[in-house]
Amino acid sequence: MSSFELTGRRVWVAGHRGMAGSAIVRRLERESCEIVTADRDELDLLRQAEVHAWMSASGIDAVFLAAAKVGGILANSMRPAEFIYENLVIETNVIQAAKDAGVKKLLFLASSCIYPRMAEQPMHEEALLTGPLEPTNEWYAIAKIAGVKLCQAFRRQYGCDFVSVMPTNLYGPGDRYDAEGGHVVAALIMKIHAAKIANSPTVELWGTGTPKREFLFSEDLADACVFVMKNYSGEMCLNVGTGRDMTILELAESVARIAGWKGTFTFDRSKPDGMPRKVMDVSRLGALGWSAPSDFETGIKEAYRWYEENVASLKN
């Protein structure tokens, strides 16, 4: 197994204010490395010359590329050009600049949505590019596939130690809580909390509630990313998840239980369900020695607590 020590390294977390990036920063605080971050007013990742100049002057040893434009089904369907363009530009700018600056290792965060819509379940890494994508997020998926392929191409042509991971659906502190841009867990936390405060007897779910999804606590993702950075060097992208899934209705019921809301759910069947099932085969990462340490209940409790203290409290 490969070994890349972080001790004494200057480690840049690109996208440190996002859910995944902020979790990686917290996890790196347990390592003996120098954590480097750059706010948007200091470094615009959409501007190639800025990224190259900043990288060449910063002496970065390792990069966690967590910066991305992210959102749920609604955001993807309303702003497809933004999702494909901005993600492509961020990836190409950072990966090329990392190579030019002599960065020793880079880890790129892709997404489980890059798999074909009807991929065999659980989804294994070899399923990539074997079928059509899910239409509700294909723009984001295509950009993320390009990022994975960039890392593979730079490894083949230039010998760069650039690796990729494919996280499943994330939730946790720092998630994006807005009606258009939020992922499913954040959207449900918002809806159910609002129903609790308003004493509303019902909450409407998009679609049928039957699609099955896998969910990963952001702190566990961060732990996996650090593990992969230190212990893996290969062209194959690695799945990161729990290997366990649940229906959207089961997810909603879990959030309701934790929030203390006792109403009932209705369904807007005019809205899309997305992929019928999406769960990862995580055996490759498991064979390297990592598995998700948090149980679902613990993670959702922490996500809901963070929302109450950092988002909901500001609206009251």
Image: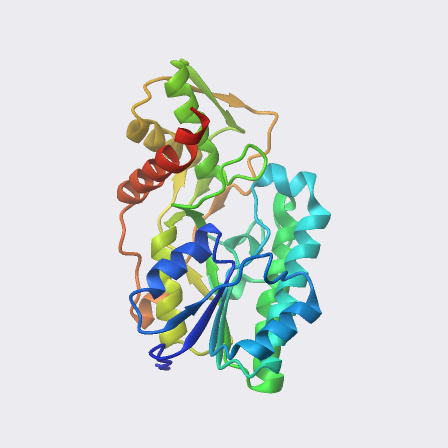
Identify the image quadrant of the C terminus: top left
- Pick the residue in front: 12 or 202: 12
Q: How far across and how far down the image is residue 159, in percent?
A: 56, 86
Q: Quadrant of residue 67?
A: bottom right
Asked whether the viewer can see residue 129, the reply is no
Q: Quadrant of residue 146?
A: bottom right
Q: How far across and how far down the image is residue 246, in percent?
A: 38, 40
- Pick the residue in front: 288 or 32: 32
Q: Quadrant of residue 44?
A: bottom right
Q: How far across and how far down the image is residue 212, in percent?
A: 44, 40
Please tell me whether residue 167 is drawn above or below residue 225 in the rendered image: above
Please tell me whether residue 198 is drawn above or below residue 288 in the rendered image: above
Identify the image quadrant of the N terminus: bottom left
- Pick the residue in front: 51 or 269: 51
Q: Residue furthest front?
A: 42
Left or right: 296 as drawn, with respect to 147: left
Please tell me whether residue 71 is drawn above or below residue 2 in the rendered image: above
Left or right: 93 as drawn, with respect to 197: right
Residue at point 43%, 16% (across, down): 202
Residue at point 35%, 32% (across, down): 255
- Pick the residue in front: 250 or 3: 3
Residue at point 50%, 77% (across, down): 60
Residue at point 43%, 50% (across, down): 279
Q: How far across and how far down the image is residue 306, in percent?
A: 35, 39
Asked whether the viewer can see residue 223, the reply is yes
Looking at the picture, the colour scheme in use is rainbow
